[in-house]
Image (cartoon, rainbow, N blue to C red):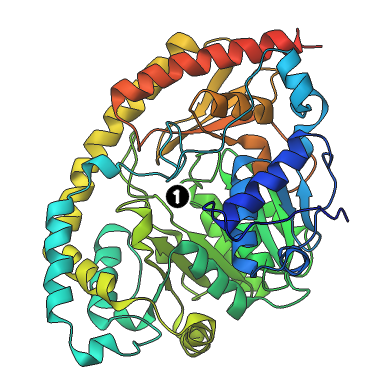
Amino acid sequence: MTTLDISVDRRSGVPLHRQIYDAVRSAILDGRVLPGQRLSSTRALADEIGVSRLPVLSAYEQLLHEGYLEARGGSGTFVSTALGGEAVASPAESRAHGEAPAEAPAEGGLRPFRVSLPALDLFPRAAWNRLVIRHARALTREQMAYGEPAGVPALREAIAAHLRASRAVRCDAGRVIITSGSQAALRLAGAVLLGRGTRVATEEPGYEGARAALAASGARVVPVPTDDEGLSVSSLARRPGVHAAYVTPSHQYPLGMSMSASRRLALLDWAARHEAWVIEDDYDSEYRYVSRPIGALQGMDAHDRVVYVGTFSKVLFPAVRIGYLVVPSSLTPACLAAREALDLFSPTLYQLALADFLREGHFARHLARMRAAYRRRREALLGGLARYCRGYLSVHNADAGLHVAAFLEPPIVDGDVVRRMAACGLTATPLSSCYEGRVRRHGLLLGFAGSPEDVLWQATRTLGKVLREAAERRGPAR
């Protein structure tokens, strides 16, 4: 395990998490830590530099998101192996090649191609602000006190009604538990369903945030390959002792395919026969561009083996920090006890406002507007990629969601491209960072929802230049 020599300045105006992020990132780019090396755990590093664990967690999370680090379930955090070879160079080497050092992401993460960022410029802030002000002015003493672990009853009712009508989820308010976003929902699911040494299957490639959240319970992450129909259930069946499987069936993250009906039934049959659990993450299922939205896997479950995860971060705005679980009735008592133990309850004010946002029809109208807007933005991105990036990348899937998955042509390395993009004011998620195992494919996840069409068009032109320079530096494919 590599120990980093990091010091922080508490008198500096730079937040602690940013100081830690800069120090770790510099150590990687300077070659002081090499691809594949294991870093100190967040807890150990916090103890070493004398800070709380929270800023270290924030720094590691950002570095994981950008592809500098990779988490291996049960093993720790490592410098990404995708950064091998020329992808990591010292500052002197970078200057010798005429490169500017890669800059940190813009504050707020608003750069073009940011994944999972909705259209904040189109959010109906006036309507939302009225609802927040209404409830802020009318807060009772009871509402200002400790809330219910499951969440505000009015919001749970509104979510259950929405899910029954739009996602074919079988639920009532008693099975809905409010959390502080989908990541917290996954942590809660892991705390209830998993334990130290238990095995949880995840999609390969898959969502790194889910692997980290589930591994936090002490579980061992077992990657299972995906194909054009989603998670391979036949491969899953060959993994003995798996207690739960995490899937994104409506819009697989990161590659974008939808799980076929036959594969869904096979997965549910596997769960019933093995008395295992399925954790369904329905993170951005509201947006499809080639067909109507696909119903939730949970609605097909006749044996109550599915725990359903949802969030409002992608359909409203990330800072709302409201997610939820829909759990089988048999798990409700354990989930409520774990929810209270983790952080008591979610803030009440936004829950009250969101309940009215749903009940008064603002949410349905917002979704309808966003479907049209995202279709336009998606077309702008695809048009720009076709014009400026042809020959360097190929779009794999753009059927749904808020991002496009694209494969890079060899010998281009995605970690290299992402760093070059950062120097040009762009961001992206490297596809290679989504793999738990050694077999990795290089590509880019390009978010389109958070930027207007003209910005996306210009950004694809810049991306084309970045790809051309990256290809020329690496030379022809062997």
Q: Is residue 235 left or right of residue 246?
A: right
Quarter of the picture holding the N terminus: bottom right
- Say which residue label 1 marks: 250
Vertical side of 117 occupied by 415: above or below:
above
Task: Look at 66% across and 68% down and name the residue there.
Answer: 51
The number of numbered discs placed on residues in the rendered structure image is: 1
Regarding residue 411, the answer to whether it shows in the image is: no
Q: Nearer the viewer, residue 59 or 185?
A: 59
Q: Secondary structure at mark 1?
A: loop
Q: Nearer the viewer, residue 211 or 166?
A: 211
Task: Look at 67% across and 31% down and name the residue there.
Answer: 415
Q: Position of residue 286 (x, y in %)?
A: 33, 49
The outermost residue toward the front is 11
Three-letter amino acid code of the residue under disc 1: Ser
Vertical side of 55 occupied by 365: above or below:
above
Q: Nearer the viewer, residue 22 or 233?
A: 22
Neighbor class of circle 1 (other Cα within 10 Å; few <14, some 14-19, many 20+) is many
Task: Look at 72% across and 53% down and name the residue there.
Answer: 71
Q: Position of residue 209 (x, y in %)?
A: 59, 55
Q: Position of residue 306 (x, y in %)?
A: 51, 70
Quarter of the picture holding the C terminus: top right
Q: Is residue 166 left or right of residue 228?
A: left
Task: Look at 77% across and 29% down and name the residue there.
Answer: 88
Q: Which of the 4 image quarters holds residue 145? A: bottom left
Q: Position of residue 177 (x, y in %)?
A: 40, 77
Q: Nearer the viewer, residue 456 or 41?
A: 41
Q: Is residue 462 left or right of residue 224?
A: left
Q: Which of the 4 image quarters holds residue 214? A: bottom right
Vertical side of 342 occupied by 235: above or below:
above
Regarding residue 471, the answer to whether it shows in the image is: yes
